[in-house]
Image (cartoon, helix red, strand yellow):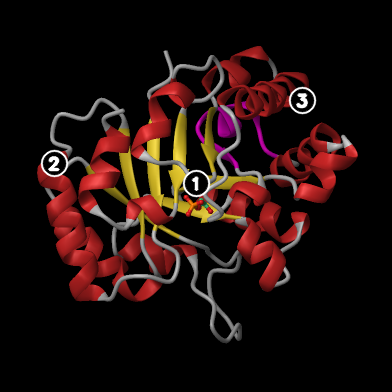
Amino acid sequence: MRTPIIAGNWKMHNTMEQGTKLVKDLAALVKDAKATVVVCAPYTALQAATKAASGTNVHVGAQNVHWEEKGAFTGEISVPMLQEIGVEYVVIGHSERREYFGETDETVNKRVKAAIAGGIVPIMCCGESLETREAGTTNEFVGAQVEAGLAGLTAEQVSNLVIAYEPIWAIGTGKTATSDQANEVCAFIRGVVAKDFGKDAADKVRIQYGGSVKPATIAELMGKSDIDGALVGGASLKAEDFSQIVKF
Ligand code: G3H
């Protein structure tokens, strides 16, 4: 009953020209995709991406957003700025932002609330380090991130957003979590949503796995009960590879 959602996170890749070409090439390859297809472009390529995606089944997302509508926040971008160019999704709380740019559970929560208020769907990221996994505290850690990120939302709001589970040790390392490891945490996250927001929200919320997803690994991941899609980094930079993932 949940429509799969596959999102490409370009990270700090692709100029306007490169992004336009990638979206056009991708759109031609994924016309018949059953999954929702999203590309999350850097700010400078967002407008080019929405233009290239217009009239196709490719949707465009940003990689971050500030919670205030406007003001003295040098270097930040607001929800109305994204709305103006037709952005429909936004990645929030990616581990790279948490690790390098001081993102916290509290700021993740503020960004999630602002995105929802502006009609932009958050793709809220969570995930543990290798240290946490080896200490055997993955569920506690991820559960706390999810609860803090979703704090104060209604069940309906939670039903409509996307959670991306990305174990940090699997990002860009070529080391994918096994499908069972990934599904175990995604199922745990769904349980946290059920406890806090009810079964209906838990049944509806879409949970992605992210971390070195490749054309060769997507089918097995998507065959699991609680994995509803993927957040793809490196393999989303080539139209052919990403289209194969989208069409798993
Ligand atoms: O947002 C995407 C993730 O960080 C995964 O990146 O597919 O290059 O490992 P990756």
Residues under numbered marks 2 and 1 in contact, where contact means CB atoms less than 8 Å apart: no
Tell me where residue 136 sits by quadrant. top right
Mark 3, mark 1: which one is toward the viewer? 1
Q: Is mark 1 within 8 Å of ligand 1?
A: yes
Mark 2, mark 1: which one is toward the viewer? 1
Q: Earlier in the sequence, mark 2 or mark 3?
A: 2
- Residue 242 percent location from the top left of the image: 29, 45
Q: Which residue matches tag 1?
A: 212
Q: Quarter of the image for the N terminus: give it.
A: top left
- Residue 34 percent location from the top left of the image: 25, 25
Q: Amino acid at mark 2?
A: Leu
Q: Is residue 101 left or right of residue 23?
A: right
Q: Is mark 3 within 8 Å of ligand 1?
A: no
Residues under numbered marks 2 and 3 in contact, where contact means CB atoms less than 8 Å apart: no
The magenta segment is: 153-165
Mark seen at residue 196: 3
